[in-house]
Image (cartoon, grey):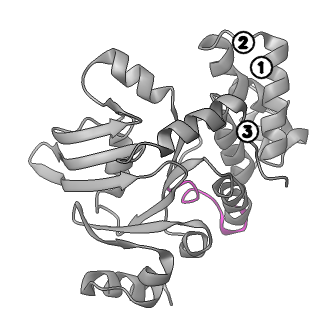
């Protein structure tokens, strides 16, 4: 599979974002409650443009909740989240502007069952960007080629394997030319033999200079191969972060060592 390339506007945007000393994603003292449950307890995290960050930790540690606050799928109640210079507030215009820069891939594929793979990909460009059908279809086919399944363009989700559906979901997220891609445990709903095909696509994306990625995952081989930085969450807090070499070979915190010893058998 050929590595994906950026268009001129993406290249310019990535260059502009990389000039931001504070990073393209900035979270400062972020807190989140679900009723009485304090799920995020003062998260501080800065992600540079083009950086690939893997967030890992036990179930219930707050990692998926945090990634969902970045595009306001969950509302944080305290602290600041700033995306490419825009603070995420209740202002609908800010939320719309931020969401236009972010693509997100979920555990479940969330494809429209009555639309073909190609139609799922082209829906947002046609409705939001008002792209002509021919232009949207041509771009959609290129995206299906990028994720390795152009021959599935006219099949419906029910006719696709789980891995193929997730690759369509990735292509759909890329269709709006986002600056940032968020992945929330994208392989957790897949059969084991389908996981590698999705990780291969994500690895190709991660090699794309300028594609900022945050991925919540338990796939430690993927993290070791592509992450610039790994961030360990536990009980709503960041316990430790660093490059994969440090996290795997010389973790500093006992909780990190304990968690890794349980999953790296």
- Alpha-carbon distance for marks 2 and 3? 27 Å
Q: Is residue 100 above or below residue 12?
A: above
Give the x, y percent position of residue 2: 84, 52
Q: Which residue is mark 2?
A: 131
**Viewer-closest of 60 and 170:** 170
In the rendered image, the residue lying farthest to the left is 36
Against 265, is 94 above or below? above
Task: Please report the residue visible at 24 percent of the width from the left and 22 percent of the height from the top.
Answer: 90
Q: Residue 170: where, in percent of width, then height?
A: 65, 43
> In this orientation, which residue lies closer to the viewer: 87 or 128?
87
Alpha carbon distance from label 1 to label 3: 23 Å
**What residue sits right under mark 3 in the picture?**
158
Q: Are marks 2 and 1 in contact (CB under 8 Å)?
A: yes
Q: Quadrant of the N terminus?
A: bottom right
Q: Which residues are magenta?
A: 185-194
Of callouts 2 and 1, the N-terminal one: 2
Tell whether 137 sits left or right of 262: right
Q: Residue at x 47, y 60 (%)?
A: 53
Residue 5 vs 100, above or below: the answer is below
Q: Which residue is mark 1?
A: 136
Q: Residues within 10 Å of mark 1 (few under 14, many from 20)?
A: many
- Residue 76 image offset from top left, x and y in percent: 22, 39
Who comes first in sequence, dot 1 or dot 3?
1
In this rendering, the label closer to the viewer, 2 or 3: 2
Relative to residue 31, is residue 233 drawn left or right? right
In the picture, measured across the screen, residue 204 lies left or right of residue 95, that is right
Helix, strand or loop at disc 1? helix
């Amino acid at each position: 599979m050929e590595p994906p390339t950026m268009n001129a506007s993406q290249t310019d945007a990535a260059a502009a974002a990389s000039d931001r000393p504070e990073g393209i994603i900035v979270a400062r003292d972020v807190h989140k409650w679900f009723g009485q449950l304090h799920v995020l307890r003062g998260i501080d995290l800065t992600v540079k443009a083009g950086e690939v960050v893997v967030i890992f930790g036990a179930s219930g540690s707050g990692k998926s909740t945090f990634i969902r606050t970045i595009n306001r799928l969950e509302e944080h109640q305290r602290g600041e989240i700033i995306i490419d210079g825009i603070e995420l507030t209740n202002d609908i215009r800010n939320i719309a502007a931020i969401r236009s820069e972010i693509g997100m891939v979920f555990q479940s594929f969330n494809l429209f069952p009555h639309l073909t793979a190609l139609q799922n990909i082209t829906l947002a460009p046609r409705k939001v960007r008002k792209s002509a059908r021919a232009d949207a279809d041509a771009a959609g086919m290129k995206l299906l080629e990028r994720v390795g399944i152009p021959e599935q363009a006219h099949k419906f989700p029910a006719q696709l394997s789980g891995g193929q559906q997730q690759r369509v979901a990735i292509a759909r997220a890329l269709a709006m030319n986002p600056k940032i891609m968020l992945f929330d445990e994208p392989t957790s709903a897949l059969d084991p033999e389908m996981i590698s095909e999705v990780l291969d696509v994500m690895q190709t994306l991660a090699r794309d200079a300028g594609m900022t990625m945050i991925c919540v995952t338990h796939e430690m081989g993927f993290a070791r191969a592509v992450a610039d930085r790994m961030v360990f969450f536990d009980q709503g807090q960041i316990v430790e972060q660093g490059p994969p070499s440090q996290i795997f070979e010389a973790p500093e915190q006992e909780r990190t060592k304990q968690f890794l010893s349980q999953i790296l058998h």
